[in-house]
Image (cartoon, rainbow, N blue to C red):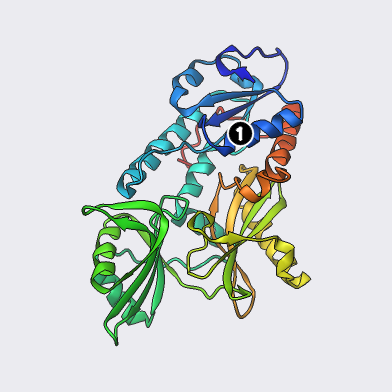
Amino acid sequence: MERADMVQCDADGINRIILIGSDSGKRKIYFEKAAADAGVNLSFYDWKDFFLLEKAESLENSVVKIDAPEWESCRLRELDELTAQYEERLFQLAKLPFGAFFNHPFEIAEALNKRKCKQRLMENGIAVTEMYEEHFSRREELFDFMKEQRLHQVFIKPLKGSGAAGVTALRFSPAKGKTVLYTCAALNRDEIVNTKKMYRLEDKDGEAFLDKLLELDCAVEKWYRKSVFEGYSYDLRVVVQDNHVDYILPRLSKGPITNLHLNNHSMEFSKLNLDNAVVDRLTEVCIRAAGCYPRLKSIGMDVLLEKESQKPYVIEMNAQGDLLHKDVYHENKIYKRQIEIMKAMTAYGSAETGYETDSTQS
C-alpha cells in the first residue's frame, strides 16, 4: 500500500484511487482487500491528516472515495457538533481539484440530514415513512400533538446521526397515563449518551429521557407496522450502487429498532421467500430513490415492507452505508463492486469533477 504523501501519478488522465477515512476499522480493511484482489493501487488519507490532503499534488489524476470519520464521543449533543464539523470538511473537499468523486461531498452532506433527504425523495414521488412537519421541544407539546392526531406510537430521531444514535420508539397511552419508550441511548448525569444496548423506560424515567432528547434537533415519524418473519419484525438494508441493487440484508428484531449492533440478527434475503412482484417493486423503489442522488455511486438505504400491503417505504438513506459484516466476511461483494465502478471512472473520467462550488447544494 502506497503512503498517501509519496504517490507518483502518470501525467495523463485519471489514474489513481484515493480513500479518505479512518485508519482503524473494517471499512478500510475490506476496501483495501477488494482493491488488492483487483490489482489496484490505493492511496489512503486519514481524516486526522486532512492538512496533507489539502497540500497534495496531482489530485486531478484521482477518483476519491470518502468514508465517514470515527468519532470518539458517545454524547449525542457532541455528535451533533461533530456532524457539523464533518459537513464543513465535506464542503472543503468539494473545492479541491479531484478528478472525480465516487460519492460527491455535497450529496453526502445532504443525506446526513434526515429531513432534507426525505424531502428530496418525496419531491420525486418516492414512498417514504412519514415525517411530521411539527417541531417539538418539550414532551408536553409532543403528547398534545399525539392526542390531537390520535397517535399512540411514534419514532423520534435526531435529524443528524447514524447507527440508531438517539433513535427512540415511543408508546403513549393518555387514557392510562402511561409512557413506554425503547432506545439504545441512556440518560447519564443529565446528558444523553449513545450505547450498544437496548433500554425500555417507563413513565417518569421515560419522560425524563424524552425531555432531554427533545432539546436536540429531532424529527418525529409515523410508526409503521413492519412485515414479520417467524415472529420477528424486520426491515431491509438495501445497497444500491451505480443504478443496481447489489445487496439486500433483512434485519430482524423482537423490538421496534432493528440495527444489527443491538443484538438483532440478519439472514439471507432469499429466505424471506417474498413474491416476485414484491421483490420487483422493492427493487424499483430503491433504484428510483438512488436516482434522486445521481452523484452518489453507492447508497445504503433502510426500507420497510408494510405488514398488510408489503408496500416498500424508504426509512432513510446513508451515503456511507456500505459496511455489512455478512458481506465482508464472505464475498466482500459490495467493496469489490465499488472497485469495479471506480476503475471504470479512472478509465473514462465519467464522474463529475470535484472542482466546483455549487452554492445551491451547500
353 with respect to 10 (left or right): left
Task: State which quadrant residue 334 falls in.
Answer: top right
263 with respect to 167 (left or right): right
Q: Residues within 10 Å of mark 1 (few under 14, many from 20)?
A: few
In this view, 308 is above or below 334: below
Rendered location of residue 111, percent (x, y): 51, 49
Image quadrant containing the C terminus: top left
245 with respect to 133 (left or right): right
Task: State which quadrant residue 204 falls in.
Answer: bottom left
Residue beneath the point at 62% across and 14% down: 7
Amino acid type of the residue that numbered disc 1 sits on in the rendered structure:
Ile
Rendered location of residue 148, percent (x, y): 32, 81
- The residue identified by callout 1 is 29
Residue beneath the point at 47% across and 52% down: 163
In this view, 60 is above or below 292: above
Rendered location of residue 297, percent (x, y): 65, 42
Image quadrant containing the N terminus: top right
Q: What residue occupies the far bottom of the structure in this picture?
A: 175
Q: Is residue 349 visible?
A: no
Q: Is residue 163 visible?
A: yes
In this view, 188 is above or below 29: below
Q: Between 156 and 34, which is closer to the camera in this rendering?
A: 34
Instruction: Report helix, strand or loop for mark 1.
Output: helix
Residue beneath the point at 58% across and 60% down: 265
